[in-house]
């Protein structure tokens, strides 16, 4: 569900979610809150069985106590992500003119969001990525991440972002490295570690899938897989769906390149089975960053089941 204080921002986020293959159970325009406040809608969504995840766009509120009490009650049972504007006095004045809201201190709001267990995004796109990740993926058991790729550059871009977001990317065990060399072939031109760069052989589903299967047995808490569209090589969707059925760990994918309708169909199949697909390394990294942030907020508050 999406609650937005601005119709235009709500439309932007809804469109981004549509592009990401994510639907909405509810789209609520909060507006000037003449009759109903944010808190009224959030209290309703606590028990709304059609809603699994909630996104908020907030300019400001005058009843901060009730707002954050409702946020905490909602976040205790469903993931909540928020995009809050208002870092300058100019924005504060614009918000007051727009919806009659006092934007207030961004730092104060951010601290309150953390206390309420709400994950914070910094743009409409980030809010859409957060909602996609939190809706499709289970929470990780920890912060040990494995990246699997056949092209080093995108995984390095993602790695840089992931480390800044709190993920650890530990080296492979000697046993895992030996098994991957066995699958790929001893003459692979690179040293195998994490990120696991399979180079050219990784483009073959008969190589990609066995390597992925072995990595899923290793002591990692989450996985980010990379694939690049090539019209002459099929995306190993069937193999990935089988592997996803063998693990309860979060698995996300970055699908590089433009492939038209074929890619859209394959993305839809993967996402229907719990593997969210992103189009850039940064989006894949941010998605897992929001997932880890939710894991930590839930753990601190004793909400883990």
Image (cartoon, rainbow, N blue to C red):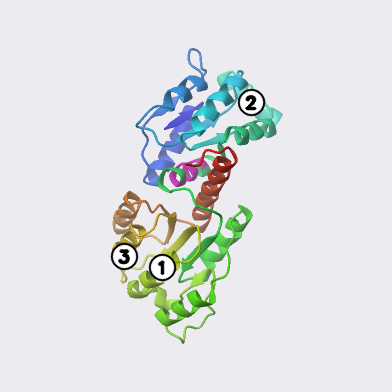
For disc 3, the marked residue is 239
Residue 276's spot in the image, x, y percent?
Answer: 40, 52
Q: Is residue 121 visible?
A: no
Of the two numbered discs 3 and 2 in the rendering, the one whose residue sits closer to the viewer: 3
For disc 2, the marked residue is 103
Tell me which secondary structure the magenta stretch mostly adopts: helix
Distance between mark 1 and mark 2 Cα atoms: 47 Å
Residue 305: in magenta span: no
Q: Is residue 70 above or below residue 126?
A: above
Upstream in the sequence, badge 1 or badge 2?
2
Which residue is at 61% across, 53% downward? 166
Distance between mark 3 and mark 1 Cα atoms: 9 Å
Stretch in magenta: 127-133
In which quadrant of the rendered view does residue 241 lie? bottom left
Q: Is residue 185 above or below residue 34?
A: below
Q: Residues within 10 Å of mark 3 (few under 14, many from 20)?
A: some
Quarter of the figure that contains the N terminus = top left
Q: Is residue 5 above or below residue 289?
A: above
For disc 1, the marked residue is 212
Distance between mark 3 and mark 2 Cα atoms: 49 Å
Side of 159 relative to 87 (left or right):
left
- Say what secondary structure mark 3 lies in: helix
Residue 214's spot in the image, x, y percent?
Answer: 42, 70
* Residue closer to the observer: 62 or 19: 62
Upstream in the sequence, badge 3 or badge 1?
1
- Say what secondary structure mark 1 lies in: helix
């Amino acid at each position: 569900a999406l609650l937005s204080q601005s119709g235009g921002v709500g439309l932007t986020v809804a469109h981004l979610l549509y592009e990401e293959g994510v639907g909405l159970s509810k789209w609520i325009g909060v507006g000037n809150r003449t009759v109903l406040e944010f808190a009224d809608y959030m209290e309703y969504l606590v028990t709304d069985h059609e809603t699994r995840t909630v996104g908020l766009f907030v300019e400001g509120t005058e009843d901060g106590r009730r707002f954050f009490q409702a946020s905490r009650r909602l976040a205790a049972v469903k993931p909540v992500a928020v995009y809050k504007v208002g870092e300058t006095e100019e924005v504060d004045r614009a918000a007051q003119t727009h919806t009659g809201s006092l934007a207030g201190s961004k730092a104060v709001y951010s601290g309150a969001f953390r206390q309420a267990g709400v994950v914070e995004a910094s743009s409409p796109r980030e809010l859409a990525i957060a909602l996609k990740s939190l809706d499709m993926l289970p929470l990780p058991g920890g912060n040990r991440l494995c990246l699997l790729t056949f092209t080093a550059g995108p995984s390095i871009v993602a790695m840089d972002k992931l480390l800044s977001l709190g993920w650890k990317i530990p080296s492979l065990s000697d046993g895992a490295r030996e098994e991957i060399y066995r699958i790929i072939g001893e003459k692979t031109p690179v040293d195998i570690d994490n990120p696991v760069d399979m180079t050219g052989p990784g483009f073959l589903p008969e190589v990609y899938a066995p390597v992925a299967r072995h990595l899923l047995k290793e002591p990692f808490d989450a996985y980010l897989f990379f694939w690049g569209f090539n019209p002459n090589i099929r995306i190993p969707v069937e193999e990935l769906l089988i592997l996803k059925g063998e693990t309860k760990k979060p698995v996300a994918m970055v699908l590089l390149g433009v492939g038209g309708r074929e890619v859209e169909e394959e993305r839809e199949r993967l996402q229907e089975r719990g593997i969210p697909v992103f189009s850039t390394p940064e989006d894949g990294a941010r998605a897992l960053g929001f997932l880890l942030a939710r894991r930590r907020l839930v753990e601190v508050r004793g909400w883990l089941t």
